[in-house]
Each structure stands twice: as C-alpha cells, then as structure tokens.
Amino acid sequence: MKLAIDAMGGDHAPKEIVLGSMDALSEMNDLHITLYGDENKIDQYVTNEKNLDIVHTNEVITADDEPVKAVRRKKNASLVLMAQAVKENKVDACISAGNTGALMSAGLFVVGRITGIERPALSPTLPTIDGKGFLLLDVGANVEAKASHLLQYGLMGSIYTEKVRSIANPTVGLLNVGTEDGKGNELTKKAFTLMKNAPINFIGNVEARDLFDGAADVVVTDGFSGNIALKTIEGTAATMFSLLKETFTSSLKTKIAAGMVKSDLKTLKNKLDYSEYGGAGLFGLAAPVIKAHGSSNRRALYNAIRQASHMVEYNVTETIKETVEKLDGGK
C-alpha cells in the first residue's frame, strides 16, 4: 500500500502531518508513505525512516491562492506533485490538509475522474448520537448539481459506506425540507425519482434536524446545501463547547464541577469530533483522494491515512466504476 501525502498542507504542517504519518507507519506493516514538501522542515519530526520517502520541494499552495490558477502555475507545489504521483501510478492514493479548492482542482485536472462519473463529491463522515456516524455528500465540490449527479452521489456513498465503514446495505436519504414524498424543489423531486429506482437502499427524504439521530447512513445533497449544513454543524459544535467552557469557569462551584466531569467532557468532545472518522473523501476520481481537515492534528491525519488505506484495500474506486458501467449499460 503506497500513499502520497502533502506534508506542507494544513494549519499545523508539517509537524502534525509528519507525526501522524509516523504513527501510521509504526502500526501498519504494509504501508509505504511518500511525503512531499520542504525536506529540512520535515526531517526534524521523522522518527521512522523505514517505508518512508521524502520528495523535496519548496513550492507550496497556500490557503490564499486561487485554486485553479495555483494548480496550473505551481507545478512543483507539494500538493500538485502528490497528485501527479497518483496519476503516474507511483502511489495508490493521496492525502492533503491544504487548500480544499486546490485539492479538488488537482483531483480533477491531474488525477482525473472515473469514466461515467459526471461530478466528484466531497464527502466527510459526521458523528451521530449513537456513535455510528453518517456520510454527507456533496459538501462543496460542486455548488450546482443535476439530479443525475445526486444519483451518482448516492451510489458512491453507498459503496464507500458498505466497503470502508462495514455497514451492510446502508440506508441512503435525500436531504430535503420535509420527509414526505414530493417535497422540495425541482432538483430534489427529480433526484428522488432517480434514487428510488436505483440499486441502493433508498429510504426517501430526510430533514437536517434528524441527521445526528442517524436518519440515514448516507445523506445526499447538492454542494451548496451540503456546505451550508457542514459549516452550520461546525459552528454549532464550536459554540456549544465555548458556552460549556464559559459556564464551567464562571465560579468556584462550576470549576469544581468541571474537575469532576472533565473526563466525561473529553469523551463527549471526541464523540462529536468528525476527524475521528478520517478526512473527506473526494469520491468519483480515478484513485482515492482524501481531504483532511485544515486544522488536523496527528490523530486526525492518522485516521485519514487509515481511511485512504481502506479505500485502496477494498477497491472502492473500482467498485464505483463497475457500478456506474452497469447502470449506464442498463439504460
């Protein structure tokens, strides 16, 4: 198993990226990692050189760069070289915590799409109350979508959830303003009909308020609505913990109470941390591409590595390709 990792992408690069890679190499015997970035900065965090290669480059795509232009002009950027390695079949998959738009552009223009997939989808796994989690796609790879795109999102999400997350016959729901059949705008109405007749376990419409209750294992929506939902979830979680911190530090009594429930609060925080599930997969590309969260620490990066490894091990890309070919052949 060979993975390429952008060591310079993310808020805490290269330290947390390299440390997460070291953790993965120490626990996964069949893993080989190639880190792309400034070798001098990377070396100080390397503790295990076995099954590790470093490709040196000083060029980096920053959060301020315009994605498409950066990918085209910065040919030697760590993120671009990483994607190029995937295209040339030097590695099986790649991971970056850097510029999301640039990674999507590199995925499209360098790695390329699976034949038959019209649009890729950015797909994180988010937490639920029961700890099972659910896959949400698309959360921003495409702001606009057609009903046929949502159908493909449902197919790809179902395959990933079954093979990587080991959920048999996963339920697939369509994010909508109501659960009744016939609800929504023209897009969701058309997508509902297509998904109802597709080879997936489609359970109909689901509402945003029910997502954390595990309304479906896979929730499908367009990138515009999905990105708003994701940012709302992130903001709500951050606000909730900020309010809890403010409450528990407001007096001596609450500080004592905080000390008594400290471990429970930490467990709650971990339960709501979607980085525990890995990164957001960019589904629909010719090889697994994982977008780790920009603020990823070593644990989050380690989980993203495991996620990418499972996608390779369980042939997710090939299964998506075969499923799309069968679907197209049956038209």
Image (cartoon, grey):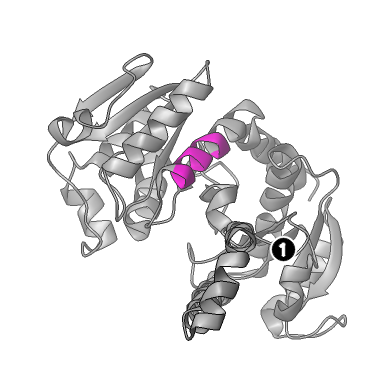
- Where is residue 73? Give x, y as percent: 16, 50
- Where is residue 241? Give x, y as percent: 52, 74
Q: Is residue 76 left or right of residue 17?
A: left
Point out the stretch of residues depicted in magenta: 299-307
Seen in the picture, residue 178 relative to 320 is either above or below; the reply is below
Is residue 87 in view from this perspective?
no
Q: Is residue 35 magenta?
A: no
Is residue 132 in view from this perspective?
yes
- Where is residue 273? Give x, y as percent: 56, 59
Residue type beneath disc 1: Thr
Query: In this orientation, which residue lies closer to the viewer: 131 or 77?
Result: 131
Query: In this orientation, which residue lies closer to the viewer: 119 or 178?
Result: 178
Q: Is residue 278 left or right of residue 45?
A: right
Secondary element under disc 1, as helix, strand or loop, is loop
Q: Which residue is mark 1?
A: 128
Query: In this orientation, which residue lies closer to the viewer: 218 or 51?
Result: 51
Q: Is residue 303 magenta?
A: yes
Seen in the picture, residue 188 relative to 120 is either above or below; the reply is below
| SS majority, magenta | helix
Q: Is residue 38 left or right of residue 319?
A: left
- Where is residue 331? Give x, y as percent: 78, 51
Give the residue drawn at x 40%, y 32%: 21
